[in-house]
Image: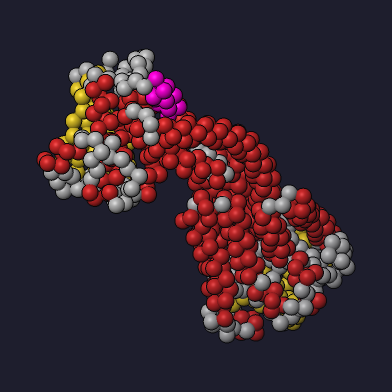
Amino acid sequence: MLFAPCPIPDPNRRQAFPVALKILALCLLSIFFAGKPAFAVNSEDASDFVELRQDDPNREIASYISYLLDPEQKLTLSQLQQDQGEFRFRQVAKSEPNFGFQKGAIWLRLKLGNTGNEELSRILAIETNFVSEIEVFQQVGASTQRLMRQNTEMPFRTRPIDYHQLAVPFSVEAGQQSVLWVRYRTSGLTALPMSIETLNSFNSRSNREMALNFGFYGIIGMFLIASIAAAIFAPARIFIYYFFYAAAVLIYIFHRDGYAFQFLWPDWPRWNAFASLPLAAALTAFASQFTRSYLNTRDDFPVYDRILLGIILLQVLMVLVTVFVDSELIKQLMTISITLCAMLFLTAGLSALRTKGRRVLFFVIGWSGIVVASLTTFTAHWLDIEVTRSATLDTMRTSMIFDAFMMGVACVSVVSELRKEREQLMVQRAASAERNFELAGRLAGLEQKYELAQAMVENSNRMVANTTHDLRQPLHSLRSVIHNLSDKKTTDKSEIDHIEQSLQYMESLVEENLNQASEDRRQVPEAPNRLMSASHILQAIATIFAKEAEAADIKLKVVPSSAQMTANSVAVLRILSNLVANAIAYAPGARIVVGIRRRNTQLIFEVHDTGPGMTAEQLKTAKTRSQRGEEISAGNPDGKGLGLSIVSDLTEQIGSVWKLSSVPGKGTVAQLFLDSQ
């Protein structure tokens, strides 16, 4: 029954609604040409009556209609007929009667004449699906007959023609003049486009219109079926939200076209008069939720997400508030709300376009069409620019179907791209896991050598003790970092590179010092002095001490540098490691900065801390071997007090110097002087 073709009416039953499927551009052009009549009218016709002819299939009549506003709704037809001189009717100046939002009633008058020799049957086609109240009368001489009466209490079956829009059959005898009176009141826009047609032209146009409209509904129905299939075979919430949005579009258009009253709730005229408000609110709310899901505003655009949630709440409140406020006012506000919401959805899409790229391109294109349609409706309702009701509805219908199609394409596109990204992520995770496994193996090797160094410490010379001291803290830091890496789903490449560089330095340090210990040599092993970037050493320091600094509530900052150096890199790393470790131990909760200064041909590695500092006497004894600060002795029982003495030995053996300066209460500065070339 829902998709049954419109029955061909008999001469006493008629249907009307001029339809033409216009693409979006043509609908916009209609704004500028809506005020032009579709036929030529001479001044005599315009000032007198519509002349009905046998060979005219239809006539548009706007230029023949005169009107009178009745804001208090007190006038009766008999008053207007008896005292026509008292009431001043004005001629309609637009292409259709349209007086914006009016609280009262409106009277329309149309004079007709049949100058032929035969009785003519015609249909007054009113291109609207529903108004709050409407009556149509035909006056012939002193006799008046009511042709139609409709209001919010009358079901669909009381219409004179079984048609989704209002249509009234009438006839004019040969040589007779007649007057059609129309009184109507509406809670929305007062646009009431009308035309006079023959039975054949009405049937032909109404059947063509129904086929075209249900073709639109069929397209959206296919979108709904496709979204259900997509939700089953490619589970994603976006398809569920799209289903509800497309369903809201379908029901809203079905209602606006008048078919909902004809087929879905023909016995509920009160609901039909009110339905446009909750259906528009539901459409806007589902569109907002679809936008939230599609753009992932909760994570990527939290400000937009809060606004979109506010829109959903606002739609609910606008429906509920009609219990206390006149629904006419809410409907007026709804036209503004829909326009602003559409512009907001488009703005959110444009913002996401900069970060998400072409993934949201279809989304932006779809909402661009809706914004054009909303602005067209807004123009018709609020601005003094004439836009026909037909153009408004056609623009809205076309843009909504276009938007539903583009949103469907957008869903498929984003799911396809997410699958590709998921596959790429799996490949990256596999590579990261393999690299983490390699790093863990290398760390295990270092730990074995570290255990060997610990066993040798009891019977070896001072250099072995120094090696054990230098290895303890870096190995502990690297172990923590790699353990954290194994818990992560993905690993930053720069983090892996820094760890690998640190491992390379530690491996070379262990190998050289263990060889030195086994040969019982006390000097630093000779290493090739080749030109290299000092940034590698700084990166290793940042990686090794990051966790320890965090545990001590220390803000450790390593300043990058592009400086080049030729010194023994292993010895320099050991020196800086001892200086940083010493600063962390004696300055918990402080700030440590590690960096490089240039002075002529020298590079000065500096370690600054904002700890408690030292007095002159403390500075004098700080470099003594096995001397530990009293402040950390209890909290660091593993320390041997070797750090600064190791620094002194290493700087002497590589032919360099270092300085230590401190101010009590302000902090300490350690400097290592090296030749840059």
- Colour scheme shown: secondary structure
* Viewer-nearest residue: 571 or 173: 571
At 51% from the left and 43% from the top, the residue drawn is 483
* Residue 57 seen by the camera: no
Q: Quadrant of the C terminus?
A: top left
On screen, residue 576 above or below 27: above
Where on the picture, by quarter, is residue 558?
top left
Q: Position of residue 160 (x, y in %)?
A: 80, 74
Where on the picture, by quarter, is residue 541?
top left
At 53% from the left and 79% from the top, the residue drawn is 325
At 63% from the left and 70% from the top, the residue drawn is 278
Q: Is residue 258 left or right of residue 619?
A: right
* Residue 286 seen by the camera: yes
At 31% from the left and 26% from the top, the residue drawn is 572
Q: Position of residue 497 (x, y in %)?
A: 47, 31
Q: Position of residue 512 (x, y in %)?
A: 41, 22
Q: Is residue 81 left or right of residue 513?
A: right
Q: Position of residue 289 (x, y in %)?
A: 60, 59
Q: Main secondary structure of the magenta part?
A: helix
* Viewer-nearest residue: 672 or 251: 672
* Viewer-nearest residue: 187 or 410: 410
* Viewer-nearest residue: 72 or 632: 632
Q: Is residue 542 left or right of residue 279?
A: left
Q: Which residues are magenta?
A: 506-519
